[in-house]
Structures are given as structure tokens and as C-alpha cells.
């Protein structure tokens, strides 16, 4: 039996990157998955490949009515929602001085408001059933600050805080809420196809695991939180970052890698 056998999940941003890896991992472990995304072609192709355990639903996470329709389709097709993975996100960079306010609001609308609307949409039926797991994909940018990340960092710090509030409100009624904080992961959002290799080399030289993360490594943690193996975790934040937020090597001090 798979680790989430019989559970139904909604995975936003599920058509590619970490979302796709999560969809594949959940299905491999017996789950049924609603692939929710604005990328219609990629989402439908993934659902066609994975078969009857999946359904693609077009979802703009910043649209409350679209969320209601998505949850309704999940209930109609699979009987309910056991797991929500708020993975959809965008990253638009710019300094506080230079960033256009509309761009700031756009990032918040997807990364923060989108997760809020998702939790608001699934919570009634999860709470009525007295069980469920909500997994919010934040970022290491929700654990520290980085120049140029005014919008993205604000959204991910906000999602970290929203997770804590939801854990307090939903936990006593059987619904666990936790956040995952990935570091740099090899996905289209990270720009690994355009960022020069020497830039990545400088980035990873300072952290304990000196390479970029793989989408599957984040998906594995989402699987753990979705499963009954994590029934005493609520309000936790898990950094899947190769040790990035543990600190940075000081090359002149003992213990730094050669």
C-alpha cells in the first residue's frame, strides 16, 4: 500500500517544476491528484500521462470563484480533499525603490492571497471531516532577507505567518498546516537555463550541500507531510535548502571545505 493510498490532493502549480514532481510522487504512493494550474497544455499532458488518478483543472489561484469550482470538481471526481499543496508561485525581482507597486501586488496576489483563498476554499469540508493536511510552499526567502526580493520575500514571509495562524485555527479540529521552505531548486522559476554556471557555483560554495536542489527532494517532504507519518506536525516550518539557512562558510576559519 502507498503512503497516501486513497487520499485526494490538490496541487497548485502542478503542471511543472516542484508541482509536477509532487503530483508524480503522490500518484506513485497511491494518491489521487487534482493538477491545478494556468498552464493548460502542460497540465493536461501530465494528467493524460498519469491517467485516472489525476484530473487537470485550470486554476488562477488569485480568483476566489475559481478556487470554489476547483474544490467542487475535486469533491465530485474523488469524493473530497484530504491534502492541499499551495505550491503555485511567481518571482518578480526589483528593489524597494524601483519596484512598481502593481508588480508588488501581483506577486502577493499569487503567492500569498492565492494560498489564503485555497485554504479558505478547502477548510470547510476538511474541518467537517475532522482531518486534512495543508502544505504551504514558502521559501528560504521567508526565513531571511535578500536584496532585490522585496515582493517575493514579502509574499513568502507572509505565507510563513499565515501558516502559523491556520495551524492555530485548524489544528484543534484535525487539520494540520505546515510550511516548506525550499532553497534554490532546479526549476524554470530558478532560471537555471539562463543563470551562468559560475554564478550558481558561487552561491552553493557557501552552503553545506554544495549543489542546487532537485524538485523531487521537495516533493518527498510534501509527501511526508501529506501522509499519516507526520500526524504530530502542525505549524512547523521545514527548510529544504541544502543547509543554506544554517549559515555560510567562513573560508578563513577551520572546518570550511577545501
Image (spheres, rainbow, N blue to C red):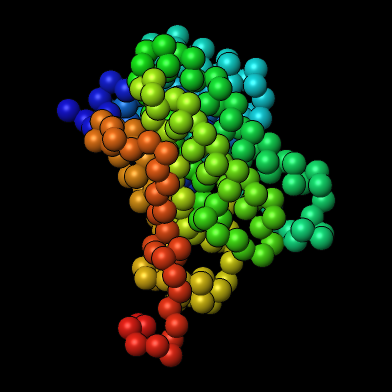
Along the viewing direction, whichever of 29 and 136 lies nearer the viewer: 136
Query: Residue 201's x, y, as percent?
Result: 48, 75
Q: Residue at x 37, y 70 (%)?
A: 208
Q: Residue at x 64, y 33 (%)?
A: 113
Task: Please tell me whether residue 111 is drawn above or below residue 189 in the rendered image.
Answer: above
Q: Quadrant of residue 233?
A: top left
Query: Residue 37's x, y, as percent?
Result: 56, 32
Query: Residue 163's x, y, as percent?
Result: 50, 37
In the picture, which quadrant includes the C terminus? bottom left
In the picture, which quadrant includes the N terminus? top left
Q: Quadrant of residue 70?
A: top right
Q: Quadrant of residue 128?
A: top left
- Number of marks in the rendered image: 0
Task: Please tell me whether residue 246 is drawn above or below residue 16 in the rendered image.
Answer: below
Q: Residue at x 49, y 31 (%)?
A: 166
Instruction: For residue 125, say whether it is visible.
Output: yes
Instruction: For residue 77, say whether it is visible.
Output: no
Task: Please tell me whether residue 70 is drawn above or below residue 29 in the rendered image.
Answer: above
Left or right? Give the position of 160 relative to 257: right
Q: Residue at x 40, y 43 (%)?
A: 236
Left or right? Give the position of 106 relative to 35: right
Q: Quick one: which residue is furthest to the left in this view?
A: 1
Query: Residue 63's x, y, as percent?
Result: 67, 25
Amino acid at each position: 500500500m502507498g503512503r497516501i493510498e486513497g487520499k485526494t490532493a490538490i496541487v497548485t502549480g502542478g503542471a511543472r517544476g516542484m508541482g509536477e514532481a509532487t503530483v508524480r510522487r503522490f500518484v506513485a504512493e497511491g494518491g489521487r491528484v487534482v493538477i491545478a494550474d494556468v498552464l493548460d497544455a502542460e497540465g493536461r499532458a501530465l494528467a493524460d500521462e498519469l491517467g485516472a488518478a489525476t484530473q487537470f483543472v485550470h486554476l488562477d489561484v488569485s480568483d476566489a470563484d475559481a478556487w470554489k469550482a476547483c474544490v467542487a470538481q475535486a469533491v465530485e471526481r474523488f469524493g473530497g480533499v484530504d491534502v492541499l499543496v499551495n505550491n503555485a508561485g511567481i518571482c518578480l525581482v526589483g528593489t524597494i525603490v524601483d519596484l512598481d507597486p502593481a508588480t508588488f501586488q501581483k506577486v502577493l496576489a499569487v503567492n500569498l492571497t492565492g494560498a489564503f483563498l485555497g485554504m479558505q476554499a478547502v477548510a470547510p469540508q476538511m474541518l467537517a471531516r475532522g482531518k486534512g493536511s495543508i502544505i504551504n510552499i514558502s521559501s528560504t526567502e521567508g526565513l531571511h532577507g535578500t536584496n532585490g526580493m522585496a515582493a517575493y520575500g514579502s509574499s513568502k514571509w507572509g505565507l510563513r505567518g499565515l501558516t502559523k495562524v491556520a495551524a492555530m485555527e485548524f489544528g484543534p479540529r484535525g487539520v494540520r498546516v505546515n510550511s516548506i521552505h525550499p532553497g534554490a531548486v532546479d526549476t524554470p522559476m530558478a532560471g537555471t537555463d539562463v543563470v551562468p554556471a559560475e554564478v550558481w557555483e558561487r552561491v552553493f560554495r557557501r552552503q553545506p550541500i554544495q549543489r542546487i536542489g532537485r524538485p523531487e527532494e521537495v516533493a518527498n517532504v510534501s509527501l511526508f507531510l501529506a501522509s499519516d507519518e507526520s500526524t504530530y506536525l502542525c505549524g512547523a516550518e521545514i527548510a529544504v535548502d541544502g543547509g543554506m539557512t544554517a549559515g555560510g562558510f567562513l573560508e578563513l576559519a577551520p572546518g570550511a571545505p577545501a
